[in-house]
Image (cartoon, coloured by chain):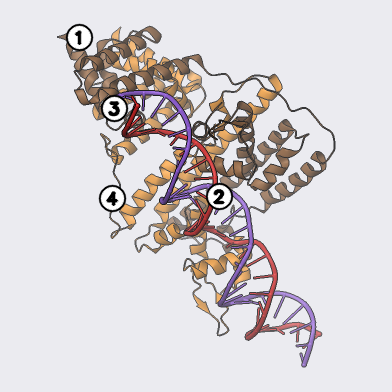
Chain colours: A orange, B brown, C red, D purple
DNA sequence: TATTGACTATCACGTTGCGTTATAGCTTAC
DNA sequence: GTAAGCTATAACGCAACGTGATAGTCAATA
């Protein structure tokens, strides 16, 4: 049984915060003394930990309350999702650090930075997307009475498909990244590329060699692609493009 | 000279935020049109970048205003300090990720976590300390009367490729959009599509019919494309895809 | 030329997540 | 029994915008 100050010091939050959480029903202590002192149990501490995790993800207190109130709230699955978000946050921070470095360089060398470059790492759209997706999943999973009404966008594919291509794309990028030191003709790289083409074929359309080659070109030709791909690693787009070309050459020779 | 929305999109902040920054004197645009429209220069963008950096460090807007108002504000030194803070933040995130991992393990294995363990990574005192120290240093440093000329940096470089494809893409989208009521086989639409293919061929690579058809498929198959294209108009991606298919059919019949 | 539609502007109140007094009761320690 | 240190509730304050409401601007069509 902990009193407010003890909890406050353990968790690094203010007493006022605990009061606040109590008053909005987010974290109501298990019991109180006759004098009205709040008494927190271990379970309360666990719940507080949950709350702080969600806060770190920038969920609002109301959202946190809703999520935690679900009877079938899956703590483990949630934590795993948390971790993903944290990793994304970390990635964003790394980008930001990169931007800082570049800015310093541009001051040193007098080189110029493109307007868009200046703001790299500030944009949180990716994280927000993930959060939206996550909150949707959470609603589907935790919310029996909450009826989904969203889906206003007329997309040719469902969010499930989107998740699939997203995951596969990420997987391919990772596999290729890991082997960037070995050249485009490396067997692991080539396997990844082959899988990539197979995935497109299975999932979308008959991806002929010609189309595939064109796609590879696009990766370096279209800055929108290049930018996106290079987020996963400097020079990945160019390398991937080369690997795809090599692959196509092998297939037609 | 950028208008509010342009700046907003470049930097990933809301228009309201820019209004706010103007109203509190944090980021006052260099000039306004006779109608009162805010016009931002490159220098304003640089200042905005600075502001966002400081915001990332969790300085208040008032503090940011004070720091930036110092005549001898040393941009480079500040950036270096930023970087340190970012690295600390990253460390904290890593700790948090660790805590998540441990929590997951403790659920799996049923082992218990010490109360203190549970909250590792949440405490920001270290960062706060650094900030206090930093702000003190800053005060000492910027408090001097020394006046230094603000570095004048030349205007930003915009990639020619990017500008070109961007412009052409926009043009094609616009031309197609205008004729969406007329069906994919409309002659203006078909002309736009033909120009599109020609542009790709001229500018990037020999865009064969097969590749072009594949590209058209991609517009509806890959949500990343669909989303992007549909920004220019609801259903544009699907329509454009159809038009491209029709075009390819005509070419091969 | 008139009319859209997409921008822009300025109020001005609403919201979140607490901080910050202010006032008062409880609980040990001497 | 009184001081020090904890606790309580209550109520206002505040930053940093969000969210309309209402109205002026501007370029491109009908």
Helix, strand or loop under label 2 = helix
Q: In x, y percent, where is residue B73?
A: 75, 35
What separation in Å lies between label 1 and label 2 (alpha carbons)?
58 Å
Helix, strand or loop under label 3 = helix
User: Is disc 1 surrounded by few (<14), some (14 to 19) or many (20+) residues within 10 Å?
Assistant: few
Left or right of residue A51: residue A100: right
What separation in Å lies between label 1 and label 4 (alpha carbons)?
43 Å
Which residue lies under the disc numbered 3? B237
Q: Are dots 1 and 3 on a single chain?
A: yes
Q: In x, y percent, where is residue A190?
A: 38, 20
User: Is disc 4 surrounded by few (<14), some (14 to 19) or many (20+) residues within 10 Å?
Assistant: few
Which residue lies under the disc numbered 4? A149
Helix, strand or loop under label 1 = helix
Q: In x, y percent, where is residue A111?
A: 65, 19
* Dots 1, 3 in contact, CB < 8 A: no
At horizontal 74% and vertical 33% (from top left) the residue drawn is: B77
User: Is disc 2 surrounded by few (<14), some (14 to 19) or many (20+) residues within 10 Å?
Assistant: many
At horizontal 39% and vertical 47% (from top left) the residue drawn is: A134
What separation in Å lies between label 2 and label 4 (alpha carbons)?
34 Å
At horizontal 31% and vertical 23% (from top left) the residue drawn is: A197
Left or right of residue B222: residue B63: right
Which residue lies under the disc numbered 2? B96
Q: Is residue A198 visible?
A: no
Query: In this orientation, which residue lies closer to the viewer: B179 or A196?
Result: B179
Q: Are dots 3 and 2 on a single chain?
A: yes
**Image quarter of the N terminus of chain A:** bottom right
């Amino acid at each position: 049984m902990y009193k407010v100050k003890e909890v406050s010091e353990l968790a690094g939050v203010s007493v006022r915060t605990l009061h606040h959480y109590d008053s909005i029903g987010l974290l109501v202590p298990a019991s109180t003394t006759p004098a009205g002192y709040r008494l927190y149990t271990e379970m309360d501490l666990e719940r507080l930990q949950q709350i702080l995790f969600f806060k770190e993800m920038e969920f609002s207190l109301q959202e946190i309350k809703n999520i935690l109130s679900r009877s079938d709230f899956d703590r483990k699955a949630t934590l795993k999702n948390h971790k993903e978000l944290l990793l994304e946050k970390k990635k964003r921070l790394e980008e930001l650090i990169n931007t800082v470095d570049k800015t310093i360089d541009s001051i040193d060398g007098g080189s110029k930075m493109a307007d868009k470059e200046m703001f790299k790492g500030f944009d949180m759209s990716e994280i927000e997307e993930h959060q939206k997706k996550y909150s949707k999943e959470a609603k589907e999973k935790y919310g029996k009475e909450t009826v989904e009404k969203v889906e206003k966008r007329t997309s040719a594919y469902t969010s499930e498909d989107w998740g699939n291509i997203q995951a596969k794309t990420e997987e391919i990028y990772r596999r290729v990244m890991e082997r960037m030191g070995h050249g485009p003709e490396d067997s692991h790289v080539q396997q990844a590329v082959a899988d990539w083409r197979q995935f497109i074929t299975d999932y979308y359309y008959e991806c002929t060699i010609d189309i595939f080659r064109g796609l590879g070109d696009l990766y370096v030709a279209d800055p929108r692609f290049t930018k996106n791909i290079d987020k996963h690693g400097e020079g990945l787009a160019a390398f991937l493009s080369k690997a795809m070309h090599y692959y196509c050459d092998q297939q037609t020779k």
